[in-house]
Image (cartoon, rainbow, N blue to C red):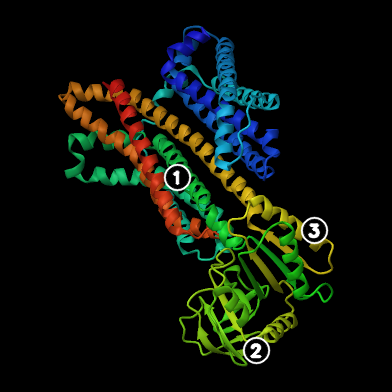
Amino acid sequence: MAAGNLVRNRRFVFPYLLTGIITVAMFYNITFLAWHQEIRNMPGGDTIPAIMYLGTIVVGIFSIIFLLYTNSFLIKRRHKEIGLYNILGMSKRHIAVVLLWETLYTCLVTIVGGILLGILLSKLLLLLLYKILFFTVQFGFSVNFTSVAVTAALFAGIYLVALMRNLLHVSLSKPVELLRGGNVGEKEPKTKVLLTIVGLITLGAGYYIAITTESPLDALMLFFLAVILVIVGTYCLFTAGSIAFLKAMKKRKNYYYQAKHFIGVSGMLYRMKQNAVGLSNICILSTMVLVMLSTCVCMYLGVGDVLNAMYPHDITLSQSWVESEGPSKEECRETVLTLAQQHGLRPTKTQEVDILRMMNTTAEGSNLSTTTRDDHLGDLVYTEVMTADSYTQITGTPLSLGENEAAIYTTENDGTWHEVTLFGKSFSIAAWLPESPTGKHSAYSDREMILVVPDASTLEEVFQLQLQDESLSSNVYWEFSLDFDGAEKESVEALYKAIRQMTFETEGNYMVSCRPAQESEFYSMYGGLLFLGSFLGALFLMATVLIIYYKQISEGYEDKARFAIMEKVGMSQQQIRSAIRSQVRAVFFLPLLGAVIHLLAAFKMITKLMSALNLTNVSLFALCCLGTVVVFGMGYFIIYHLTARTYYKIVR
């Protein structure tokens, strides 16, 4: 009997089984990648498992919520059937046994089918991940039995919880209530003014935060608050705002009393309480897909820009001025050049700079001082002070400055200042620099000031003044950078390791960075994020499709009798088809429109978040967003046509 019930309800059960199998397969694969030993042995191999562990948590939580949500939809669709069994003589204990066997069949099919599908797809996904990360492909096939056990245990637990909820629902319901369950929601909902106002306020507040946030540090702190406000606003406006809008349409007699509008508006109005939650879920899931895919694709494509911004040279050795012991600059330079020669490398370019970097500064006009506890993160000004010789080394442009003169680049003024004060010492502005000599620093703040002083003694004086102002979070460094154009990556990395070993054995405070050595780590991180974003995007897209399908099928069965009445009172098939299209379009494209609006509102804040990772190519992100919206919209349009056809077949 249980198997027969599943077959008879195949229009609802088979999509549920299919999505259950796919969800199980995806969870198995994400755990498989998180625990795969070969990945750990790759360069940057510690990054990928950490990202996949995060994905495991997200997919696990999503699986619980999603499968319980779809199960509640299925059991609601079967209220009449279960109530009829009860009236015809079956006790609730017998009904519970039937539900138990149905759950066992469902659990067995989805877990076994999902794990088998996951095992078959695991090698393909592993090869895809290797391709994204530029790793060497490893031949062979393996099954992670820990992943199998964890996957089986998780989804068995999910189906057990679903069964307990179903049994509790049946035991607490009366047969008459079950028979009437399919008609719940027929009463026209009332306009909820307060909820509509709450939705407008929360959505507006979320948009305001996203659009007005300027500092990357502020964006990091406020992003999740903005997300929560937008989610709350979305649910409130879809639930209450949509009803208010439809009732406003109903009051427009010239619009409402047309056959196509009359059926569409009244049909959606009578079930908007149920529709609103589904539409909100679709809108939020669609937004998550658009944001994740566009962001991850942009981060992966822009990894070269990030590397160049963070590591502009192949190798850079930094020596602190604070340390009085240790070798001199000249001795360090000769040691590095000797090590390069020993490794068969000849630098194509070298650069020496003395530079003071500070993030603990605020500006009041042209007066720069250290921060206090009362200062806001958005008030921070990223500051660099360098000598004129260092500026010439970096830019190749000679710069001559007199005593107490300075050249300046800043985002704080448009060129009208005549002097600038650093920690009480004033400089006359001799020149305005057209751009920052050391590139953008938006990873720290959108506010920055680059000051060029005459010589090293002036730089030392500024540093000592800052120390007297009780700020110890910065330092002056001598930086010696080398570039080896056309050199083998392995040779540069070997030199980097030799220089690091030298610094370990030498007195002083040193830092060494190497761009080629960081490439694998960066591609592991950004490639892993792209893979995880695409993986989760596919999972959320599947959930979106299923929610849309179930919602339209449910609406089709509920509207079947209503449209039959319309046909009997004289409406033509063409009029009915037109009304159906009007309603289905509204149900489909309103969430998509909302998702695109959410993405546009979040655009600026996301660019600020990415700038914290030194990814400042806004044009690239805009293209990624546009491409993601176009591709997602095309898929959405295909789903619309398929669902509209199914909906029409039901109501016809």
Q: Name the residue under label 3.
A: 501
Q: Which mark is residue 290?
A: 1
Q: Name the residue under label 2.
A: 425
Report helix, strand or loop for mark 2: strand
Front-most of 170 and 305? 305
Name the image quarter holding residue 48: top right
Question: Amino acid under label 2?
Answer: Lys
Residue 277 horizontal side relative to residue 20, left or right: left
Report helix, strand or loop for mark 1: helix
Percent x, y of residue 422? 63, 84
Q: Residue 393, relative to residue 17: is it above or below?
A: below
Q: Residue 48, relative to residue 516: is it above or below?
A: above
Name the image quarter holding residue 10: top left
Residue at position x 55%, y 82% from top? 398
Which of discs 3 and 2 lies nearer the camera? The answer is 3
Percent x, y of residue 390? 62, 77
Q: Can residue 165 be seen in this view?
A: no
Percent x, y of residue 115? 60, 22
- CA separation, marks 1 and 2? 50 Å
Residue 371 horizontal side relative to residue 619, left or right: right
Which of discs 1 and 2 lies nearer the camera? The answer is 2
Label 3 packing within 10 angstroms: few (<14), some (14-19), many (20+)? few
Q: Is residue 149 visible?
A: yes
